[in-house]
Image: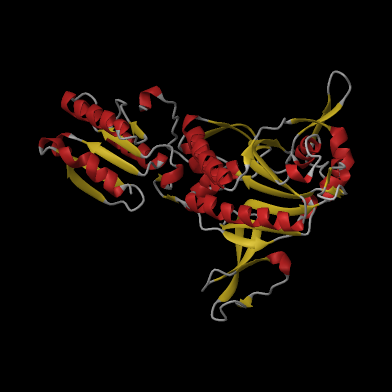
Amino acid sequence: MKWTQFYIPTIKEVPMGTEAVSHQLLLRAGLVQMLTSGVYSYLPLGLRVLRKIEAVINEEMNAIGARELLLPSLHPIELWKQTGRDETLKDVMIQFKDKKGRQMCLGPTHEEIITDLVKNYVQSYKQLPIVLYQIQTKFRDEMRPRFGIVRACEFIMKDAYSFDQDEQGLNKNYQLMYAAYQKIFARCGLKVVIVEADSGAMGGDVSHEYMIPADIGEDEVLCCDACDYAVGINKGQPEGVCPSCKNGKLVKRSAIEIGHIFQLGTKYSKALDVHFLDEKGQKKIVVMGCYGIGVSRLIATIIEKNNDKAGVIWPKEVAPFAVEILPVQVSDDNIMQQAEQLYVALKQQGVDVFMDDRDESPGKKFNDADLIGIPYRITIGKRMLAENKVEVKDRRSGEVFPVAVPDAITKLCEVMQ
């Protein structure tokens, strides 16, 4: 892909009214654009990041046997009344009547909908377990949207649901999902803190939150400064000596919740009458689990933890592109010829490559390159090309090294490993 064929409206100055670094960089790097408070458009560069994260999630969900589907956003309120959550979530639920007079809502979450769907399929123990997931837009009437896409009225979530015969089956799927979430967040370049949590309006007895310590976080955790031990504030653990390693101290940190998993038990299956016949022909109630990731919030969190004064520093797996080719003077035929050759060669190698072919000043192009944060950059200029060399830069380390043109592809592939 080439810059002149793309749409990346970068901004030099910090936008007014933005507090979080991630919010500022999302706007400045041309990843998103605000329509109104709490509602954002994902621009082409931001959408590429979103798709990269979704690909990671899909791979890890498929690896544990979860299957993707897509549920409707438009819900009849009657389903919500059966669980009582039309009242529990009434403060954030967006409700209205359609032209037929039916009371409807835009889905803030999908437990009721997925439970009703599975109810119409499961009759026998032979049809269990089932693990289904989706990546979809949710809607919540947030009174105070904050920090851009960290807390928004319209946001993207990955929500998965397990359906089992008994608690033993639920525990197995819960542990699979627990480990899969660790892999997902690690692949996104994040060091996650996992804490036991309250289930709140979701219900159930067991739940864990996946937290990222960050200054803009709206939750709090106690983290040991000497080991990986962490605990949620709600568990009553005092600050002080770490009970795990005995050497470190527990320190209160603000944190962003990026994932939450729940053992729901039978809360929803009882309310919606989801039963099956066991091996003895006896009627049993289905046992459920629920597993969520804030996908759009994850984008902001990645930026919050991966940036410097110049811009974003994308982890490799979720970067919009792997390599940027930057020809310094597009008016120079030799430079552009070499840039095109490298561009084609990298594409043939299967590298996700991007070229800044704009007729802009070198300073503007270098600043934008650091701002959008593609992991590796190949700079082609007159001086280096006169020596038959190009310059390769690692965005994260800042390391810059000259490479002979014939060796450029090989060297780049080596450093990308």
396 up-or-down from 222: above or below: above
Q: Position of residue 223 (x, y in %)?
A: 58, 68
401 horizontally vs 107: left or right: left
Task: Quadrant for residue 96, please give it.
Answer: top right
- Can residue 134 be seen? yes
Describe residue 285's horizontal placement relative to residue 337 as left or right. right
Name the image colouring.
secondary structure
Identity of the residue furthest to the front in this view: 280
As drawn, 300 above or below 331: below
All told, the count of numbered labels is 0
**Looking at the image, which residue is at 72% across and 31% down?**
73
Quadrant assignment, res 103: top right
Instruction: Decide if residue 259 is on the left or right side of residue 225.
Output: right
Find the residue positioned furthest to the bottom: 246
Q: Residue furthest top?
A: 99
Pick the residue in front: 216 or 120. Answer: 120
Q: Is residue 313 visible?
A: no
| Quadrant in which the N terminus appears | top left
**Quadrant of residue 383 within the rendered picture:** top left
Q: Nearer the viewer, residue 413 or 340?
A: 413
Image location (x, y in percent) of residue 147: 60, 45
Q: Position of residue 134 (x, y in %)?
A: 64, 38
Residue 378 in the image, given as x and y percentages of width and height: 26, 39
Q: Residue at horizontal 55%, vertical 55%?
A: 182
